[in-house]
Image (cartoon, rainbow, N blue to C red):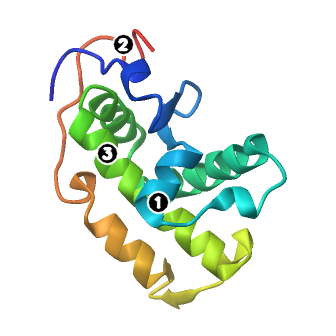
Amino acid sequence: MSNQLVDFELYSNDFVWDMKMHFPIPTVDYFLQRSGIDILQRFDTTTEAQGFLVGVTRTAKNYAFREKLLQDRMAWEYAIAHDEKLIYEVLEYIVEFVKVALVSGDYQKLFETHNTKNRIYIPALENAYNNLTMTSKRIQPTLGGYYNGY
């Protein structure tokens, strides 16, 4: 992990860094390139499609961080913002979430799934989740402010 913040503007064709969520949100074009699905056919405007991506990204982030303490979440947000490789790993994870939401036909269907041991289990999402570095690696908290510079 670099101490230097990724220059988000260099990757604006692929993602937008959400300053409130502290997480990358794939663009409509990136989603099309990586999934082959044109979500613009499902929405009236690009703004609506991008809004859908924001909502699903929020759900994907909550799912990924569901068992992490606040300090660990903040450390991972910091790490992702400082590592291009992690950003693209997260984007691929989000693409899988969006695909499940679109295939199910209903955003709420993400939560109406198998429940194993009092835990929501969605096979495609669990597979994507298990491929994230943050599920298998603990990261050291950073010194200073987590959100300095972005």
Question: Label for residue 21?
Answer: none
> Which quadrant, please, contains the N terminus?
top left
One can see residue 68 in this view? no
- Nearer the observer, disc 2 or disc 3? 3
Tell me the SS state at disc 3: helix
Q: Earlier along the polypeptide chain: callout 2 or callout 3?
A: 3
Residue 126 in picture, x, y percent from top left? 38, 75
Residue 26 in picture, x, y percent from top left? 50, 44
Residue 117 vertical placement versus 129 (above, below): below
Kindly report the distance in space between the C-alpha atoms of the residues bearing marks 3 and 1. 10 Å
Kindly report the distance in space between the C-alpha atoms of the residues bearing marks 2 and 3. 24 Å
Residue ID for mark 1: 95
Tell me the SS state at disc 2: loop
Residue ID for mark 2: 145
Q: Amino acid at mark 2?
A: Gly
Residue at (70%, 52%) from the top-left corner? Answer: 52
Q: Amino acid at mark 1?
A: Val
One can see residue 81 in this view? yes
Q: Nearer the viewer, residue 30 or 97?
A: 30
Question: Label for residue 88?
Answer: 3
Residue at (45%, 15%) from the top-left corner? Answer: 150
